[in-house]
């Protein structure tokens, strides 16, 4: 069973990692979050262990919640939902996630947890579809660049 702790190794905190995530990421929207995600390693790699390979960050905008007390409450609730549900990600799926809270009111923990679970179930499917599309486009571009020997 995966550990339910939330150690520093699963936190996304370096500026270069945030920049890479925001510049090269895909997005997933639901009623509560805009989730930026970027796959770290190829699925099935030896270093790809779900609990250790996935990293998470949480953002609650100051524009929506002026008081730090409410922002911190929401961040604690989101991190707790991530901590308890991150083992639901498929084995071998490693990615960086940024959960951006987009609702203008403080939601109950149950609603936040439901949105986190929905994101964790949808994103691996999106990642697989994206990888498949990229593989198809790569093979199509390789076929286009190769010229038959008799056409010169």
Image: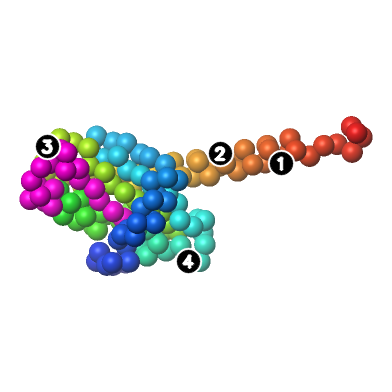
C-beta proximity under 8 Å, tags 1 and 3 = no
Q: Earlier in the sequence, mark 2 or mark 4?
A: 4
Span highlighted in magenta in the image: 56-73
Instruction: Give the alpha-carbon distance from disc 4 to disc 1, as whole Å.
Output: 30 Å
Q: Secondary structure at mark 4?
A: loop
Image point (57%, 41%), residue name: 134
Q: Earlier in the sequence, mark 4 or mark 1?
A: 4
Q: Earlier in the sequence, mark 3 or mark 2?
A: 3
- Which of the 4 image quadrants contains residue 140? top right
Instruction: Give the alpha-carbon distance from disc 4 to disc 3, as whole Å.
Output: 39 Å
Colour mode?
A: rainbow
Residue 47: mark in rendering: 4
* Residue ID for mark 1: 142
Q: Earlier in the sequence, mark 4 or mark 3?
A: 4
For label 2, count other residues whose C-alpha is less than 10 Å away and answer few (under 14), some (14-19) or many (20+): few
* Residue ID for mark 3: 105
User: Is residue 90 among what the camera can see?
Assistant: no
For label 3, count other residues whose C-alpha is less than 10 Å away and answer few (under 14), some (14-19) or many (20+): few
Marks 4 and 1: which is nearer the front?
1
Q: Height in image: 136 above or below 53?
A: above
The stretch drawn in magenta includes residue 75: no
Image point (49%, 57%), residue name: 41
Instruction: Give the alpha-carbon distance from disc 3 to disc 2, as whole Å.
Output: 37 Å
């Amino acid at each position: 069973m995966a550990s339910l702790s939330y150690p520093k190794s699963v936190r996304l905190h370096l500026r270069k990692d945030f920049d890479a995530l925001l510049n090269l990421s895909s997005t997933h929207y639901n009623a509560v979050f805009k989730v930026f995600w970027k796959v770290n390693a190829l699925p099935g790699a030896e270093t790809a262990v779900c609990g250790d390979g996935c990293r998470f960050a949480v953002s609650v905008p100051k524009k929506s919640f002026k008081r730090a007390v409410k922002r911190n409450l929401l961040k604690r609730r989101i991190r707790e939902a991530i901590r308890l549900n991150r083992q639901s990600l498929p084995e071998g799926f490693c990615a960086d996630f940024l959960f951006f809270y987009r609702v203008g009111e403080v939601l109950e923990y149950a609603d936040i947890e439901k949105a986190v679970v929905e994101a964790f179930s949808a994103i691996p499917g999106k990642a697989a579809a994206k990888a498949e599309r990229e593989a198809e486009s790569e093979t199509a571009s390789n076929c286009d660049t190769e010229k038959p020997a008799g056409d010169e």
